[in-house]
Amino acid sequence: MKRRLVMFMLVLLLVTSGLALFPGEKMYACSCVESGVQERLKTNTTVFTGEVVKKGQSQQSKHDGMLREYIFDVDTAWKGVNAKKMKIIASDGGSESCGIQFEKNQSYLIYAHQYELDHKLHTNLCSRNVLVEQAGDDLKLLGAGKVVSKEDFGETSDGGRSGPFDLILYGTVILLATLAVLWFWRRKKRI
């Protein structure tokens, strides 16, 4: 009996010391650095007001937890807007993981940055996005933005290049390919 008790105590000691030595993955709560409107305007890739017209499904990301794609119909732009409808990826967890959810048919002031891993526009709780009705102080400090219409840009953007730049890029590639074919053809003809 004593021997079983000693064995039980040893096993219990090993298990508890193992848990203490090899804890599970650490979790940290969301911690945001306060910044003013001008600082956010300077550090973010895109700043605009717009209405959520599409709310995608929440999906697991390899690097960033749960993410959700939103399409905004842009009303006013201050920086980085290249389409009437902008695609923004938002962290979709709870506020403890800096997640934020936007509601369809609601208008928001959006601060988003281009993420270096996928080159898409991302935002989260720390970006300080807010409903337009609650953005009075930010809007005053931002000043008059540019009202955006469909005629100004293409219809939709995912945060990458779009519009005239793509036409110039594709035209240049086609021109270079044509010149290369002509050069090889003339060279072959001379031989």
Image (cartoon, rainbow, N blue to C red):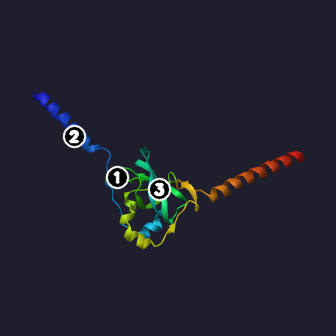
Q: CA distance from mark 2 to mark 3?
A: 51 Å
Residue nearest the viewer, comparing 61 with 158: 158
Measured as percent of width and height from the top left, residue 128 is found at: 38, 62
At 63% from the left and 55% from the top, the residue drawn is: 166
Give the amino acid at mark 2: Thr
Q: Is residue 53 visible?
A: yes
Q: Is residue 36 visible?
A: no
Measured as percent of width and height from the top left, residue 41 is found at: 46, 67
Give the amino acid at mark 1: Ser
Quarter of the image for the N terminus: give it: top left
Q: CA distance from mark 2 to mark 1?
A: 29 Å
- Residue at the farthest left position: 1
At 44% from the left and 62% from the top, the residue drawn is: 111
Q: Which residue is mark 3?
A: 72
- The answer to whether 40 is drawn above or below residue 68 in the figure is below
Sequence-wise first label, 2 or 1: 2
Measured as percent of width and height from the top left, residue 107 is found at: 41, 59
Sequence-wise first label, 2 or 3: 2
SS for callout 1: helix
- The answer to whether 134 is drawn above or below residue 64 in the figure is below
At 37% from the left and 71% from the top, the residue drawn is: 137
Q: Which residue is mark 2?
A: 16
Sequence-wise first label, 1 or 3: 3
Q: Which residue is mark 1?
A: 97
